[in-house]
Amino acid sequence: MLGSPSSWRRIPERYGLIGSRCETCKTNYFPSRQICPVCRRRGKIVEKAYTGKGKIYSFTKVNVPPAGFEIEAPYMLAIIELDEGPKLTAQVVDCEERDVKIGLPVRMVFRKIQESGREGLIHYGFKFALSK
Amino acid sequence: MRKVAIVGVGLTKFGESWHRGFREMITEAGIRALADANMPGSDIDALYGGTMAAGRLIGQEHITALIADSMGLNPIPATRVEAACASGSVAMRAGYMAVASGIHDQVVVGGVEKMTDVSTGEVTSALGGAGDQEWELFMGATFPSLYALMARRHMHDYGTTEEQMAHAAVKNHYNAARNKYAQYQKEITLDTVMKSKVISSPLKMFDCSPITDGAAAAVLVPLEKARKYTDTPIEIVASAQASDTLSLHSRESLTRLNAAIEASKKAYGQAKLKPSDIDVAEVHDCFTIAELIAIEDLGFCKKGEGGKMTEQGETALNSKISVNTSGGLKGCGHPVGATGVKQIAEIVWQLRGEAEKRQVKKADIGLTHNVGGSGATCVVHILKRGD
C-alpha cells in the first residue's frame, strides 16, 4: 500500500483540476507536464486551472471492479474531453448507462474516489455528472 | 549488423497450472527450446527474460537470475526486461540486438508469467500496473474498461458492432481447438460470446483473454551459424518497437495505436515488405476489439474496416491472411510475459510447416504484433524462412 505523501502531492490536480499549459505552443495539458512534448526546451510550462466543463468522449459500465472499488460497482467510467482540450479518465455519477452518450456535456463534481483499506486514507478527487 | 535466425522454440502447455510453479514452467520451456535447436546449454552466451509482474504475482523479483540458475546456465549474463504485456517481445528484441550487434552469438530468450497463485482481484490490480496508476487505475479503471472505452469509440466512429468483435473470439477458439498448447481447446459459437456476462460494456467475458500460467522460449543465433543447429532456420527480417502515452486518454485517438502503426511501418521498411506480403500473423488480441484495431494498424485492411474484415472471415485459417492461428491471447491464453515469445514460436512452427491441424497452406512470411498496456508499447517482428 502506498504511503500518504503519494496522495497528498496530487491534491491540487485531483481536487482543483490544476494542470499545465505550454505558453509557447498554447497547448493545454492535464495532468500537468514538466516538459512540453512539442516544444521541448523552447516550451514554457505554466500552471493552468480547468473549469471542469467538458463532454463524454467514450464510456463504459464497469461491472467487474478492481480491488478497492467493490462497493462502488457497477459504475460508469468515461474519458472526458475538457472544454479546454485535454482528455482525462473519470467516473460519471448519478446516471444510468442508458443516459450516457458520446458528446453529452458534463461537469466536474467533487467526490470520494477510494480508501486505502479500513484504516487508511480516504482519497477524494474529481468525478463528473451529466450537465442538466 | 548481422542477420539473426531462430533455431529453436519451446512452450509449456498454457492454462491453469496448479502443479507447477514459475521456475518449473520457464525451465521446461527453455529445455524444449534448446532440445529443438539441438544445442547444448554450454553453447549459450546470454539469457534475456520477459515477465511483467512476478513481484506482484509470486513475490519474486530478480527472475532472470532465477532462470539462469534453474536452467543450469550460470555464469552467463541474465537480463530481465519489462514492458507489461509486451515484455516477451521486448526480451526477443533484446536478444535479437545482442546477436545482431555481435556482442553475443547464441542467446536464449524466455517469457513467463505465473498468474494463478493469487486471487483474480490481485491479478486485476497487478495487470492494472500496465496503465497509468495515478490517472487511470486510481479512478477505477481496469484493463477491460480501457479496451471497452476503445471499443465504444470504434463503434461510434466506424459502426463496428458487438457481433463483429465476437467473430474474432469465435475464430480464435476455432484455431485454439487445433493447438495442443492452448488453454481452451474448444470451439465456441457467436451465441456463446454474445450471451456471456458483461465485464465492462460493451465487452463481455468471451471478448476477454483469460488468466493463464505459461512459459515460452526461443534460441537465437547469427544466420550464418544457424545451419550448424537446424535445417530450417527462421530469419528475423524485422524487429521494431515504439512507444506512446501511458494513459489511453492522453492520445488524440482511441481507435488506433500509434505505437503499433509506427512499429509496423519501421518493420515493413526493414524487411522491405508490405502488409499484403504477410501470410500469417499473431496479433495482440487481449480483447476482441484489440484484434480489430491491430489488423487495421498493421495495414491488413483500411481504417475502420477491422470489424467487417473479421466478420467476413478474411482473417480465418487459410483465408486472405491467417490471423492468430495459435488461438491468440483469447484462445491459447495470455500468460502476460510469455505471450510475445509464444507468438514467435507459433510463427516459427507455421513457417517450418510444423503447425499440425492449424497449418497455413502458404506460410512463407509471418508477423508478430505484441502490445504493452493499452498501447504504450508495441513490438512488431517479421520472420521468414532462412533459405
Image (cartoon, coloured by chain):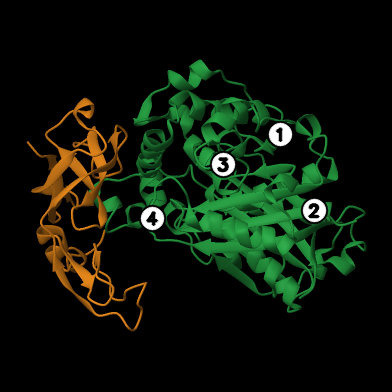
Up the image or down, B103 lies above or below B65; here it is below
Residue B322: give x, y in percent of width and height: 70, 36
Please check whether the numbered discs 4 and 3 fall on a single chain: yes
Q: Along the polypeptide, which appears first: circle 3 or circle 1?
A: 3
Within 10 Å of the Cα at label 4, are there few (<14), some (14-19), or many (20+) other Cα atoms?
some
Residue topped by disc 4: B129
Q: Return the residue at label 3.
A: B302
Q: Is residue B321 left or right of residue A19?
A: right
Query: In this rendering, does residue B184 appear at all?
Result: no
Q: Secondary structure at mark 1?
A: loop
* Horizontal and vertical percent position of residue B116: 48, 42
Q: Is residue B207 left or right of residue A79?
A: right
Q: Chain of mark 2?
A: B
Q: Residues within 10 Å of mark 3 (few under 14, many from 20)?
A: few
- Mark 4 or mark 2, whichever is nearer to me: 2
Q: Is residue B292 visible?
A: yes
> Which of the 4 image quarters holds residue B199?
top left
Among the two numbered marks 2 and 3 on one chain, the one whose residue lies closer to the N terminus: 3
Mark 2 element type? strand
Q: Which residue is located at x 84 percent, y 40 percent?
A: B353
Circle 1 sits on which residue?
A: B320
Residue at image location 70% in from the left, 52% down from the top: B274
Q: Residue B370, which numbered label?
A: none
**Chain seen in green:** B
- What residue does disc 2 label? B384
Chain letter of the orange region = A
Residue B353 lies left or right of residue B130; in this view the side is right
Q: Residue B241 location in percent, x, y? A: 58, 63
Amino acid carrying label 3: it is: Lys
Mark 4 residue type:
Gly
